[in-house]
Amino acid sequence: MAKGKEAGICRGKKEKIALLLILMLAFFAACGKKEGGDGRDGEGTEQAPKQAVPYSEQAGRFREKADKLRDLAVTEEINWELGVSPAGEAGNAVFFSVCDTLKRAHVYSGTGVSLEEAWETAAGKAEEAIGENGCAPVWVKADIVYISEEITGEELHSELKSSRPGFFRYGMAFDSSYQTALLEAELNGVQVYEYEEGSVDLEALNRYLEESGRNMLNALPEDYLIFQCLGWICDDDGQIYFLDSNQLDYGRRKVDVVDKACVEDMLSHASAYLASHVNEDGTFDYGVYPQFDEKIEGYNMVRHAGSAWALLCRYRMSPNEELAGAIRKSIGYMTEQIVYDDEGRAFLYDASEEEIKLGGCGLAVVALSEYVDVFQDGQYMDVCHALGDGILSLLDQETGEYVHVLNHDFSQKEEFRTEYYDGEATFALCRLYGLTGDGKWLEAAKSAVGHFIEADYTQYCDQWVAYTMNEITKYETDNPEFYIFALLNAQKNMASIYQRDTTYHTHLELLMATFELYDRMVENSAVEGFDEESFLKTIYARAERMRSGYFYPEYAMYMKNPQQIQNTFMVRQEGYRVRIDDVQHNILGYCLYAQNYDKLVKYGLLEYQK
């Protein structure tokens, strides 16, 4: 949009921020919401009703939830906040999204001179439709337009072209009366916004309108109305959550604080999701694009090994039989993919690409060493040794550099592919030393770390380097160069990590692995020259930002098959992609955050809440 229009919306939003904060506080008080967490219990996904419910009863259930939402949304304070005609010529506009968890939400809208009139019009449409179609109102979400602005097609083109996919967080009305109006979550949820072309995809729009029983458009208008909403969701348990209106976190539930309880809840569900997607043969369901429930093709053993490690880390925190069974299957499959050369050295083979990746060998060691420690089961000790020898065969201990990829016959395929493999392999060598006490692993790891320092691996903002430095300094305790490098790896990347607009889940891993090392340093002596305040501020910011990559019901309800992906992690800018490594890295980062939460609070973490 043009600068004038952008400034107009920004001014309007800024003027409303202060009161919105007051309204949020009043909302939390009204709900009696406990500090931290999201109020959910248990693991896994909600189930559809087992017995048929009369359509009239489903309509009654909707009205009950809508009335609970009304008590919080249609108030004197909200009316004052909205002002006169927040939806332009339409006056006021209200949307109800109703989802049974089995299919994409139905959305009903209404307008009116007053908020009350718009609310009752939208609620009446939803109630009537549910009475006819029997949709179970498991999740009911209410959105009230609180700011709107006209935008030309040219301005929209510029805005979409300059936005990451999925990051233009505005709903859109295609006429001034809101006869055809869609929420931001609908538009991004079915790819109506075409970011690469900078346009509205009329074919996708009409396909969605037809599927949802609404009138299709013959053509796109020259100008559009874009809008944002205040939102609330009532979940299956009748708990209501106020939704964020901040641009990057738009439409996601608010919590008082991202504390241990909040994180444990996400971990519980996400690890259950990952475990439930381990097949009988030990492979994972690799991934899905949930907008249209399309499976992601291919397989990657590096990601398989990392996902098995994530399950192990979660199991260490909260053991249960479902996780244990999934872990044993996935580890079993991984070990079946290990191949040996003539000298008995082991390598993890990736059949999908017919190659051996250094990173896969490294993460296989990390996962197996974790398994040995967690279950106190030494059955994989020999495999760990053989994999370690395979890694050593790829390392030049004079230079600290590795060969990255081999062919199936163990000949060299690529000398270098990605710097991440270096960190994964060196972390594995450190873990082997911790497991066996054999100095050859530590000496090899020191050689590789020397190369990291000389080549300045801080430039890669790599969490595997952070894991490596945290691990090696547990054993190599008197090398100041290692500590300096480890802290620089965080400090030099702090500003970019803090400002990152995407969830970029590996950043929290980097920060938390560095925090463990930093905490040991502080216990032993004063640490000078490190910006602890920015460090804590960035840790909290990333823990908060990553929640926008969690498939809460208010996000999942706009996907094709919500119950398949609710309560796990996704990547918005990649078509809401849910892939095993997306879930893995979120689990690993949040595990470290939860395990260190009490210490973080003592350092002053909660002083840096937004």
Image (cartoon, rainbow, N blue to C red):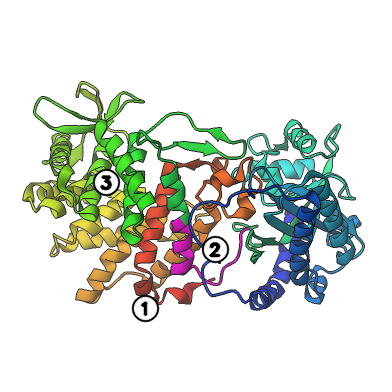
In the image, what residue type sits under mark 1? Lys
SS class of the residue under badge 3? Answer: helix
Please indicate, yes or no, whether residue 446 appears anywhere in the rendered image: yes
Q: Which one is nearer the viewer's eye here, 292 or 450? A: 292
Tell me the mark number nearer the camera, choosing from 2 and 1: 2
Label 3 vs label 1: CA separation? 31 Å
Q: What label does residue 367 carry, if any? A: 3
- Of residues 150 and 315, the one drawn nearer to the viewer in this rendering: 315
Nearer to us of marks 3 and 2 is: 2
Q: Nearer the viewer, residue 610 or 485?
A: 610
Looking at the image, residue 488 lies above or below residue 295: below
Q: Look at label 3 and name its amino acid.
A: Ala
Label 1, on which residue? Answer: 602
Q: Quadrant of residue 260?
A: bottom left
Camera-near label (3 vs 1) is: 3
Identity of the residue furthest to the top in this view = 409
Residue located 40% across and 77% down the image: 604
> Who comes first in sequence, dot 3 or dot 2?
2
Residue at image mark 2:
40
Q: Judge from the rendering whether residue 446 lies leftward or rightward of residue 125; answer left or right.
A: left
Q: Quadrant of residue 400?
A: top left
Magenta residues, start to end: 252-268
Q: Is residue 17 left or right of residue 429?
A: right
* Residue 477 forms part of the magenta stretch: no
Mark closer to the chain start, 2 or 1? 2
